Image (cartoon, rainbow, N blue to C red):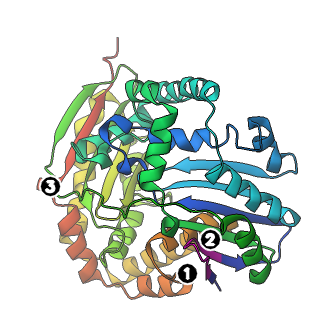
Amino acid sequence: MNYQYHTLKNGIRLVHSEVKSPVSHCGLMVGTGSRDERLHESGMAHFIEHMIFKGTKKRKAFHVLGMIENSGGELNAFTTKEETCVYASFLSPFYEKSIELFADVAFNSIFPVKEMQKEKMVILDEINSYLDNPAEQIFDDFESLVFQGHPLGNNILGTEKTVNSFKKSDIFRFMKRNYRLDNIVISSVGDINLKKLIALTEKYFESVNLQGNIKDREIFNAYNPKREVNQNGSYLSHIMIGNVAYKRTDSKRLPLLLLNNLLGGPALNSRLNLNLREKHGLAYSVESMYNTYSDTGLFAVYLGTDLSKIEKSIGLVMKELKSLREKKLGSLQLSVAKKQIAGQLAIQYDSRQNEMLSIAKSLLYKPKLKSIESFLKEIDELDATSLMEVANEVFDEQQLSTLIFEAKEND
């Protein structure tokens, strides 16, 4: 892809890919998330993500929500451990309308107290919905187990106590401390030339002035493997097994990405799916994941199974991890694994919305982006020896943590 760049005078960065299409995609991403919260602020970044749509200095909430969607577009937002993002997909003639709205909600929101009270109830319902779904809750609880005592272990949604405590002054205090202009990226994939896009971003963003502090995130370096078993109360048991892994900029990230995809990626022929589901019929759902952060990462396997099959399922997962630690991939196996992940990445980037979000996140942490072609070239250069070395570091059985939600006994 041919990405174009520009930096506004105030430090906000812009990345753009011009494509001829009736539909365009644009987003604003801030390098601030739940790990930047202090203990009493748990859930604040996510709360702000909700509240920016609740009214600005010149718009009521229904005007904000209707600005893009009344023109057939879609407006959305999300919060992660390290980022907050608002983004939209829209018909290409509505570029200016979308960019103006981003600037308005991001920097002119007024956070009405009445709306705050309503949104607290919405978020508490969101928290409860997770607690009602152990297949989702276990992912958050596993991160809390692995990153125990560190901000990375805090739930993005916060807790009932912290969310109920939020005041308008707390919002402004958090934003003043964490939002910096050089930590904001505007990302665009659509039918507009760079010159016109720069003019629009300068028009609506160049007057923005933020004075947040230089990020001084608490580094995570205190991992201790743990095993925890909790009673679930549902009919299915849920299991997660994993270890800390490589940070976003580590050169060993690519070998682990390939191993993760081979082990439990989205393909039906992943090793875990073939073994646990197809061969033994133990799990309807089984997958592995690898999340990267600025200073660490997390590798994990998830599966749901019957209470009586927990130990057998864990044994089969361990068998697959051991195989990757002890047996080098043959040339044919390695070639197939490379082709598979290359195809999946190409399919992911075939969604222009996914591409827009991906390049926004990448530019937050790198001055320039790698093309998908150069990324695939790096994958193609991986060898079986480097993969085995990574497997022995991350899949070390003595370093794995385990979290089990045990189902209730069958009557």
Q: Is residue 305 magenta?
A: no
Q: Is residue 7 magenta?
A: yes
Question: Would residue 7 be found to the left or right of residue 36 on screen?
Answer: right
Q: Which residue is mark 1?
A: 372
Looking at the rendered image, the quarter that the N terminus falls into is bottom right
Could you tell me the amino acid type at mark 3? Gln
Query: Which residue sits at x=71%, y=44%?
Result: 57
Query: In the rendering, at what x and y percent does residue 313 appear?
Result: 28, 42
Q: Which residue is mark 2?
A: 349
Which circle's residue, 2 or 1, is located before the other in the chain?
Answer: 2
- Give the secondary structure at mark 1: helix
Question: What is the C-alpha distance between the residues marked 3 and 2?
Answer: 34 Å
Q: In the rendered image of this protein, does residue 235 appear above or below residue 332? A: above
> Residue 363 — which label?
none
Q: Which residue is mark 3?
A: 399
- Give the secondary structure at mark 3: helix
- Decide if residue 247 is in sight here: yes
Q: In the rendered image of this protein, does residue 158 appear above or below residue 318? A: above
Q: How many marks?
A: 3
Query: In the rendering, at what x and y percent does residue 163 appear?
Result: 45, 29
Question: Would residue 67 be found to the left or right of residue 282 on screen?
Answer: right
Query: In the rendering, at what x and y percent does residue 374 appear?
Result: 50, 87
Q: In the rendered image of this protein, does residue 41 appear above or below residue 82? A: above
- Decide if residue 353 is in sight here: no
Question: What is the C-alpha distance between the residues marked 1 and 3?
Answer: 33 Å
Question: What is the C-alpha distance between the residues marked 2 and 1?
Answer: 8 Å
Could you tell me the amino acid type at mark 1? Ile
Which circle's residue, 3 or 2, is located before the other in the chain?
Answer: 2
Magenta extent: 6-15
- Give the secondary structure at mark 2: helix
